[in-house]
Amino acid sequence: MELVTPGLGLLFWMLLSFSIVLFILKKFAWKPILKSLKDREDSITDALSAADKAREEMANLNAENEKIIAAANEERKKILAEAYEQNHHIVSQSKDEAQKEADKIIASARETIQHEKNIALREIKHLMADLSIDIAKKVLEKELSDDAKQREYVETILNDVNLN
């Protein structure tokens, strides 16, 4: 049973060696260990605060990016609206100019057609006159082939002239 209950001498030496080890640890090892633990705790705290700051900066950057994207989208909408308006204006102006040009061409074509029609009518009149003269000439040559018929015809014309 001596192993279970230590003797008073053994207890004294154990207490003395434990006190010496405790004193040596306290004198030389305890402060550096506590200092390194404190440094480690401070570095962890700093890292956590830096992570929080980085998270806040990322949130701010994301908010700024969203604002920039929204502004860019708004600017894009404005540019597209202006481009559409300019396109509409140019198309409308082109249509008006094309309509005016078409009206000029149609008017010119009508004038040309009228002029050609007048020329054709004059040519037809001349042709008809020439044909009438040829027909009259042939009829008169046939009817007035002898002298008696010629005199009778001249008298008829003279009587008609006097009556008019």
Image (spheres, rainbow, N blue to C red):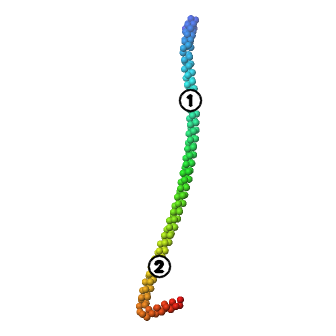
In the figure, 106 relative to 85: above or below?
A: below
At 43% across and 90% down in the image, what residue appears?
Answer: 143
Separation of disc 2 and disc 1 at Cα? Answer: 109 Å
Residue lying at 43% horizontally and 86% vertically, measured from the top left:
137
Q: Residue at x 47, y 74 (%)?
A: 119
Callout 2 secondary element: helix
Q: Nearer the viewer, mark 2 or mark 1?
A: 2
Q: What is the tally of numbered marks visible in this picture?
A: 2
152 vs 17, left or right, is: left
Residue 131, given in percent of the width and then of the height, sits at 44, 82
Q: Which mark is residue 50?
A: 1
Q: Position of residue 138 (x, y in %)?
A: 42, 86
Relative height, residue 13 to residue 41 (above, below): above
Is 153 in front, or is 164? 164
Q: Name the mark on residue 125.
A: 2
Assign the N terminus to one quadrant of the image: top right
Residue 134: percent from left, percent from top: 43, 83
Q: Name the amino acid type tagged 1.
A: Ala
N-terminal of the pair, mark 2 or mark 1, is 1
Q: Residue furthest bottom?
A: 148
The local crowd at label 2, few if under 14, some if 14 to 19, many if 20 or more residues have their Cα within 10 Å, is few
- Residue 6 visible? The answer is no
Look at 54% across and 14% down and name the residue there.
Answer: 28
**Relative height, residue 82 to residue 8 (above, below):** below
Q: Where residue 92 appears, x then y in whole percent?
A: 54, 58
